[in-house]
Image (cartoon, grey):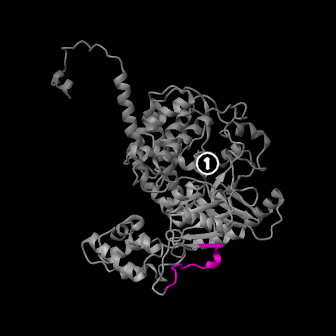
Amino acid sequence: MCIRWLFRYSQLQQPWRAAFLKHIRCGHQGARRWTHPAGGPYRAVIFDMGGVLIPSPGSVAAEWELQNDIPPGTILKAFISGGENGPWMKFMRGEIATEDFLRQFERLCSEISKTSVPVGSFFSLMTSEQVAKQFPVMAEAITQIRAKGLQTAVLSNNFYLPNGKSFLPLDRKQFDVVVESCLEGVSKPDPRIYRLCLERLGLPPSESILLDDLRPNLKAAASLGIHTIQVHDPETAVKELEARLGFTLRTFVPNTCPGRKTMDIPRDSLEKYLKDLLGTQSTGPLELLQLDRGQSKPTYYVRLADRQLVLRKKPLGTLLPSARTVEKEFRVIGAPFYLMEYCPGLIYRDPALPGLEPTQRRAIYTAMNRVLCRIHSVDLKAAGLEDYEKHGDCVPRQVQSWIKHYRASETSTIPAMERLIQWLPLHLPRPQKTTVVHGDFRLDNLLFHPEKNEVLAVLDWELSTVGDPLVDVASSCLPHYLPSSFPGSLLRGFRDCDFTQLGIPTAEEYFRMYCLHSGMPPADNWNFYMAFSFFRVAAILQGVYKSSLTGQASFVATEPSGKLTEFISNLAWDFAIKEGFRVFKEMPATKPPMRSYHTQAGHSPCRASQA
């Protein structure tokens, strides 16, 4: 799920914004969407069974080993022992009977663990009705796929049970094609079994997509031209599949909940407005759910007939001075009523990008860097944004604005915040140029193409302004200095991770990359921008915390954020200290003053110089 509204614009937006959008579309002539039957390439979805539709043997084994005091990893090691000629692979090709497999597998597990392993107990658990149950989210996805006219298939490495039947604890009516390794005598990742599945579907590889949890199986499928999705957990996999197919696979909407009473909006008025605006002849009631995106402003998923939208509004009650303004966002998108198109796509919530290859991570951060350069290259006059904000030095204006914001939300004295409030106005930089500034530029505010490392849209423009572009660069580097254990959902980090191993550029590399792409010379006072960025985050956290105390925050989960303000402000002060040392080191050397021998009684100049 994602909200797309900057790079692709709908009929709700006014034509005069076209110039602005044109400059930041990253070269795209509209984001590509995978839909069916209107021109999309997918005509079938192929599902693995274990690890995709039902719990994987590996996950069942891990829990069973823990409960039975078996050395962890014993079953998994036995699974891969012997490769294609091992007992597990032979069993899945139907080459050995169940009794022979259990005997061989138990001997192998006992050799690996140096202890007796009751494999029969594990096998009974793995094949039991209590464990081998289809994930509901996958069952619903299959129903939605078939309702759209696509074919479905299950391609499973399975085996025979003691009763002579194959192990397939699924409703076969869900699938147009069922391919079982034990019946065919061939198993994944052998290319023959993929070709067999495609032949029965009557489709070329390019028109199908495979969901599997094992990389070797995916690699073999991809080598034939089949599109693939690696499944780490069913929920995430279904989200990615939605992004590929271009339609929702769930009757429920992910990351939503019924709206809190303090966040209610008048449904009847909204429904009438939307029908008048969109000309929609609804056959059902308006569906309205609150999204977990948007801590400062309530955000909703809206469905009316076949239109899916996202609505964002001001919270009720008295707002803090300089609080994030919805008007700023609708000014950017050009809509008098803040509505956005709802569509599938990829948003990376964790900046460490778990589950991806190092080369993919670097490509994503490179794409992030390049789109920021494109935003900063927007011609303000051509985009109609000359009067968007006061021109001139925006950093002094923002520093004072965030100080006021913090003071208005202050609930206790935080020493680091007090020091920063004194320090920041005394160390303001001179901007090298004036550009559009996003104001909250970070990875989870970007929408990525589901199959390419390309940014399709930039979200959350409510802090946008015109000013110093390095504010955005520093904002995008915040995770580099936050620990991965940082509590709370507002920010995540990877300070304690190995950047080389991850493939993610360091903050210094990211800054140099930006300077190279934008043509801007490197700035020496980088530490100031980081200090200001963390100060701003601390002020935001404090504001969200105070809002939660009065019931105005979008989600109750924001309440612990009050404890995070001090942690973030300490990080900001660390950068302020670094900037102070840098300035001190760059000061020209001066001759020491002539020593005065006229001292006051009781005062030792030597002692003073040593102090």
Residue 558 in the image, given as x and y percentages of width and height: 50, 59
| Position in image of residue 606 (x %, y %) | 16, 22
Which of these two is toward me, 103 or 64? 103
**Residue 501: image location, x then y, percent:** 39, 46
Using the image, determine if residue 288 lies above or below residue 567: below
x and y, in percent, of residue 62 in the image: 38, 71
Whether residue 299 is visible: no
Residue at (37% x, 82% y) in the render: 120
**Magenta-drawn segment:** 164-178
Q: Main secondary structure of the magenta part?
A: loop
Q: Relative to the observer, which residue lies in front, 312 or 72?
A: 72
What is the crowding at mark 1: few (fewer than 14 residues within 10 Å), some, or many (at least 20)? many
Residue at x 71%, y 67% (from the top left corner): 287
Indicate the quadrant containing the C terminus: top left, top right, bottom left or bottom right.
Answer: top left
186 or 538, which lies in front? Answer: 186
Q: What residue do we see at 52% from left, 84% from top?
A: 165
On the image, numbered disc 1 is attached to which residue?
460
